[in-house]
């Protein structure tokens, strides 16, 4: 969709807040896990026309109103550290680069909250608060680049702090959200949940007022387990102590991390970094329990444990450096199913170079981030790996877990995750809040490539990737309008 009267945008923002540069538009068409162009074409993707960087929530509201009046698709984007395609502007139009909204607006020590703009990176807020003796209750391990609004948009299901303080959704005092028609609404804590995990399809978050906590004393541990079973049992018990941070690294992943110099850990079946936090008495009490639970494990020196804590943001992306790129699938697994799921993943990915990062979440679940090394330039090989998305989908359904982040690539799984009635409610809500379907179309509940078609193409990618490569390359010469018509005729939801 071409924005005919783009000049009107200059009445809202200044020239340096807009780019239509071709290279910029290509960069803003990707997220953390770049896809081959032919795959994007098979999605019937329309390239974006313009990237706009609003300076404040008022401007954001005017841009959204502008898009709504002209029926222009609009894709909110934080740092694009997600990999399910949620931040990909699949229907073209406007990309809203929200990283320009990055100020701390207010800090209230008495009422214990901070109010920030949506595009502020976590790391900056963490450092800013910690220098004052305060801290956040939850943040993702992508904190050096992830934005606060992007974390909320993507669902905020895992993070440092969650086992102790709960999901960040429960720490929100209010959000300022720009609705599809440009109106700005301020939510109450309960209403905020509507927008968490909606991936920018229901509104664009402009400001966030968030509870903060006094920084407690911390104790750092690092344990090595000789068996998966012993490690998972200990992990399950340790989570009950509600630590500030707990995760695990499996042997294969540690081998790779050591290879790139991102860690220098001894090789054990499972390595568990743990941080507990509280008063002196609480730490003393918890330490006794930690020692009991981990009595059969190897306990490493505190210096190494602290080193791992400082590495907590580097793990996943250090692995990517072995790349050139990665495919990422995140799954939320109930702790009781963890061992089975890990064994399945290991057998499924036996031929790949892959690794798992994990983070304890709430409600006795753990989020697994599975990284598979990939190279989108080697297309046949890439397609073979892309097919794992469907395999993971089936694995998730089998083990009562759910994909974490629907975005674009996981939409075909929605009918397996939710009942038709639940999907209808979600779609009605979308229709009510965004009747022209301008906000991040073809994401979450809008299934662009319907189930059967997605399942059969993914299956073929896994079995005969060279044939799929040939097919997609040939199809990429087809006029875009034909690809889009084909998808629509198959029942795909395109704008
Ligand atoms: C190494 C690594 C570690 C990670 N660790 C974690 C983790 O611990 N926990 C976790 O939950 N995730 C994790 N992730 C996934 C991801 O980084 C996070 O979800 C992150 O918070 C997303 O922020 P972002 O700014 O990159 O969002 P983006 O990727 O830019 O956006 C995510 C989604 O939200 C929408 N969106 C963006 N901004 C807004 C807004 N202001 N209003 C409405 N919608 C918006 C986008 O359209 C998109 O659909 C990790 C990823 C990597 C690569």
Image: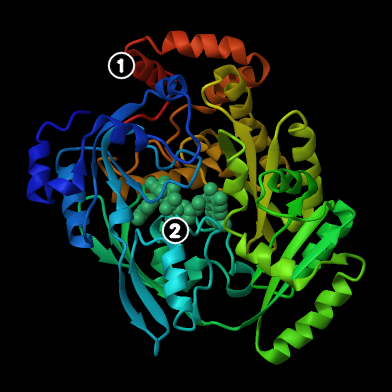
Q: Residues within 10 Å of mark 2 (few under 14, many from 20)?
A: many
In the image, taking residue 43 as reference, residue 12 lies left or right, namely left
Q: Which mark is residue 481?
A: 1
Tell me which numbered mark, 2 or 1, is placed earlier along the sequence: 2
Q: Is residue 375 above or below residue 370?
A: above
Q: Secondary structure at mark 2?
A: helix
Q: Is residue 326 above or below residue 144?
A: above
Residue 171 appears at what percent x and percent y? 47, 73
Identify the residue at image location x=72%, y=84%: 283
Residue 86 appears at what percent x and percent y? 43, 42
Q: Which mark is residue 256?
A: none
Identify the residue at image location x=88%, y=59%: 230
Is 365 in front, or is 330? 330
The residue most toward the right is 296
Instruction: Find out if the beta carbon at label 2 lies less than 8 Å from the nearest ligand 1 atom.
Output: yes
Mark 2–mark 1 distance (CA, rounded to whole Å): 34 Å
Q: Secondary structure at mark 1?
A: helix
**Quadrant location of the N terminus in the rendered image:** top left
Whether residue 341 is visible: no
Q: Are marks 2 and 1 in contact (CB under 8 Å)?
A: no
């Amino acid at each position: 969709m071409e924005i005919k009267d783009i000049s009107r945008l200059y009445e809202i923002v200044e020239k340096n807040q807009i780019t239509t540069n071709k290279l910029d538009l290509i960069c803003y068409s990707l997220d953390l896990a770049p896809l081959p162009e032919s795959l994007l074409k098979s999605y019937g993707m329309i390239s974006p026309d313009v990237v706009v960087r609003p300076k404040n929530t008022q401007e954001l509201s005017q841009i959204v109103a502008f898009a709504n009046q002209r029926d222009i698709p609009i894709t909110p984007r934080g740092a694009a550290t997600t990999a399910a395609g949620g931040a990909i502007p699949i229907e073209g139009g406007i990309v809203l680069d929200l990283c320009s909204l990055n100020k701390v607006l207010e800090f209230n020590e008495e009422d214990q909250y901070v109010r920030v703009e949506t595009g502020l990176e976590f790391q900056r807020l963490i450092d800013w608060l910690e220098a004052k003796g305060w801290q956040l209750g939850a943040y993702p391990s992508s904190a050096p680049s992830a934005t606060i609004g992007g974390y909320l948009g993507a669902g905020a299901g895992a993070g440092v702090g969650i086992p102790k303080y709960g999901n960040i959704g429960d720490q929100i005092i209010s959000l300022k959200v720009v609705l599809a028609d440009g109106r700005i609404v301020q939510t109450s804590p309960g209403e905020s949940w509507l927008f968490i995990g909606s991936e920018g399809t229901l509104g664009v978050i402009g400001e966030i007022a968030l509870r903060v906590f006094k920084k407690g004393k911390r104790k750092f541990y690092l344990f090595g387990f000789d068996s998966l079973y012993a490690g998972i049992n200990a992990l399950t018990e340790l989570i009950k102590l509600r630590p500030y941070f707990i995760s695990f690294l499996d042997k294969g992943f540690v081998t790779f991390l050591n290879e790139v110099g991102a860690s220098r850990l001894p090789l054990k079946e499972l390595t568990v970094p743990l941080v507990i936090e509280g008063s002196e008495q609480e730490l003393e009490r918890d330490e006794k329990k930690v020692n009991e639970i981990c009595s059969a494990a190897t306990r490493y020196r505190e210096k190494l444990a602290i080193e791992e804590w400082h590495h907590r943001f580097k793990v996943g992306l250090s692995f990517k450096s072995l790349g050139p790129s990665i495919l990422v699938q995140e799954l939320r697994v109930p702790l009781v199913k963890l061992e089975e799921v890990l064994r399945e993943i290991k057998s499924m990915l036996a031929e790949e170079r892959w690794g798992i990062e994990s983070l304890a979440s709430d409600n006795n679940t753990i989020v697994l981030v599975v990284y598979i090394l990939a190279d989108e330039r080697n297309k046949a090989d890439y397609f073979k790996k892309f097919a794992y998305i469907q395999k993971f989908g089936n694995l998730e359904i089998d083990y009562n877990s759910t994909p974490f982040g629907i975005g674009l690539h996981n939409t075909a799984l929605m009918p397996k995750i939710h009942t038709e009635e639940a999907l209808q409610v979600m779609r009605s809500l979308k229709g009510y809040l965004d009747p022209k379907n301008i906000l991040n179309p073809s994401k979450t509940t809008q299934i662009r490539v319907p189930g059967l078609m997605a399942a059969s193409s993914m299956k073929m990618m896994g079995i005969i990737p060279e044939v799929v490569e040939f097919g997609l390359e040939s199809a990429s010469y087809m006029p875009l309008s034909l690809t889009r018509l084909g998808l629509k005729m198959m029942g795909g939801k395109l704008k």
